[in-house]
Image (cartoon, grey):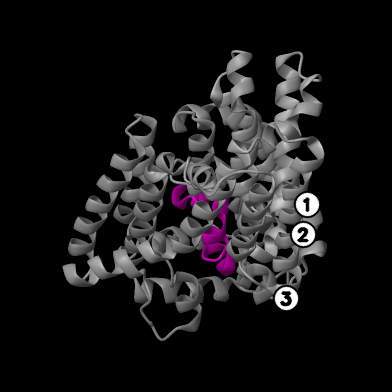
Amino acid sequence: MLSFKQAVIPVITMAVLILLSVLFWEAPIQIALFFEIMIIIALALSWGYKWQEIEEMLFSSFKNIGNVILILFLLGMMIGLWIAVGTVPTMIYYGLQTISPKYFFILSFISTSLVSMAVGTAVGTASTIGLALISIAQTMGLNLPLAAGAIISGSYVGDRMSPVSSIAIITAHSSEANLMDMIYHMLKTAVLPYLITAIAFLFIGLSNFSSLKAAADLDSLSQMLSGHFQVSFWLLLPPILIILLAVLKVPTIINIALNILFSLLMGSYFTERSWSELLNIMFRGFNERTGTVFIDNILARGGLTSMLELISLIIFAVLLGGLLEKMGVLNSLLKPFLHLIKEKIHLIAVTIFSGIVSATLGCNQFLAVFLPAKMLSKNYDKMNLERKDMARALGDSGLVFSPLIPSYNILSDIEIYHHLNINFLVSIKFRFSP
């Protein structure tokens, strides 16, 4: 077994490489992980491991991620169809219809949280309806950092609570927990913070209200959407269906696959697109030019290929995790803290601490979940704790803490910040629910 000093070396080099990539080199995190893997391989060889052993350790975890990769590909295809068919434009359209200047902040928080639950992605929500809302806030003359805080707070609700969220799926998979059981379990610690956040934005909105302009701007944004896309309540059936089947505990892969077929049928009925167009959108995403820059910016996304970046991150992280686990790095790091784990509450506390540390060092939600799960899963079995308990602890720590890290926000490329030049450090004080 490695000594604690040896185990710390890979952690330090990983943190340094990731921070250099994010803050100075402006390189994708995958490149940092690639070089980290090379460093660990070199360390392993110097510590006496043979190449055959290293190769086995590298690919030891690959057999467990096939279903995750398939789910992510299916999600990409589904989101592309939802945009092309008109489901996402319809959600944005009706979201805009509910906006009132007096209640802008609470309605922004609620509407983005609902959309994020339907589409399962914070970045997708923030860069679609979120971008529309921040534009409305600008035309109304509202406090933009405050508006960004409400929008981003709502956008991240679906990241850990939506049955179609890639991060939620990865959290359940890493923890070996059932997805819907995990989501129901997370509700115990999610409902109260959500209500407190909503009340906070309500009172802030009422106290900041003044005579504001822009009812016409709301109408013009809605007209742009309805002019280029079919808008109908019927088009809300796909997200309703996916939530219904998830509640009925239909397996995630079957749920999303059925939704893709249903969306294809709706696309052939509600739009004039050919099957060839719809199938190509499933693969490449929605990239049509409507002639309206605003519409093009917020709805050019989705498709199987849109998931390649995330999947490449997962592959490198799994390679790294396999090395760290099989070489005993994770156990060596955990060993000094094992004497502190005498009760179940202590294990939960260590999990939360590990999630926050992993989020800080990795600047990434996936690593914030994957590494602690690898490190602590056996301890949960020893103490007869359910895996959904570990999943909730990781959701309440690494997942919610990651968006509060400046370097994570550079990586996630949320358009709200650079599109309207809103400073992250200024708006973070309004991120009541990350």
Amino acid of disc 3:
Asn
Q: Position of residue 430 (x, y in %)?
A: 77, 54
Estimate the spatial distance between the alpha carbons at disc 1 and disc 3, rounded to whole Å.
33 Å
Q: Secondary structure at mark 1?
A: helix
Q: Secondary structure at mark 3?
A: loop
Amino acid of disc 2:
Val
Amino acid of disc 1:
Ile
Q: Is residue 395 left or right of residue 287?
A: right
Q: Please name the residue that numbered disc 2 is placed on.
A: 16
Label 3 vs label 2, nearer the camera:
2
| Of the image marks 1 and 3, the number of the one nearer the N terminus | 1
Badge 1: how crowded within 10 Å, few (<14), some, or many (20+)? Answer: few
In this orientation, does residue 256 appear? yes
Q: Secondary structure at mark 2?
A: helix
Image height check: is 163 above or below 10? above
Q: Please name the residue that numbered disc 3 is placed on.
A: 421
Image height check: is 296 above or below 176? below
Q: Position of residue 348 (x, y in %)?
A: 70, 25
> 408 or 377, which is in the foreground?
377
- Residue 254, quarter of the rendered image: top left
